[in-house]
Amino acid sequence: MHIVIMGCGRVGATLTRSLESRGHSTAVIDSDPGAFRRLGPSFSGLTVTGMGFDRDVLSAAGIERADGFAAVSSGDNSNIIAARVARELFGVENVIARIYDPGRAEVYERLGVPTIATVPWAADQVLRRLLPAGSEPIWRDQSGRLRLDTAYAPFAWVGRTVAALEADTGARVAFITRLGAGVQVTGDSVIQEGDFLSLFVVDEDADRTLAAVAAGPKGDD
């Protein structure tokens, strides 16, 4: 694959080296030619000095043949404009923009531009390490409405189906980790002892939903 990256800060340089180590070709755009020093002497891709939303600059980086475009500069506006230019003018389907303002990130997600909201992600990672295990979900969507929680299957659910758990609790079982391996599930899948459940939960209902999972089937009251 050929990937064009806008921004050669720490994130951009790290991303570029990771892509190159996997055998992909890369082109890096930055307005500061000194930033390319972060790529190191072994970098074999293209470097283009200029603004990442400039059509001539993008063309010099090989955007016409690009399989993906990542805008990871320090400017929200520049990132989102560049991502839209790559998608709408050059037809690159696989684009992503790093956004610091979580409000903007949510808006652009709704417009169909995938984003990484740096501040909420970093804050969530810190919370997960500060607070007791299990008190924070392992993932939230950009809007904060949907979350992914994990829990070992309570013994009361052993022998019951995934459909029964979902009907009683309101959770949705994304997958089960069983004996160290991920297992796709259907409604007819039977929960076994030792299963580690990955559950999609609506954030505002999380306490009630997780309590219902812990309580076991309703018919066992």
Image (tube, rainbow, N blue to C red):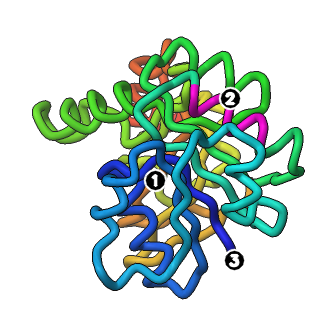
Q: What residue type is labelled 1?
A: Leu
Local crowd size for mark 2, using a 10 Å CA cut-off: few (<14), some (14–19), many (≥20): some
Question: Magenta stretch?
Answer: 78-85
Viewer-side label of 3, 2: 2
Q: Is residue 80 magenta?
A: yes
Residue linked to disc 3: 1
Up the image or down, 211 lies above or below 46; here it is above
Q: Residue at coordinates 28% horizontally, 62% vertically from top-left? A: 38
- Three-letter code, disc 3: Met
First along the sequence among labels 1 and 3: 3
The residue identified by callout 2 is: 81
For badge 2, the amino acid type reads Ile
Label 1: which residue?
197
Residue name at image x 89 percent, y 51 percent: 91
Q: Tell me, for residue 98, which label it has, or none.
A: none
As measured in the structure, the alpha-carbon distance from the residue carrying label 3 to the one carrying label 2 is: 23 Å
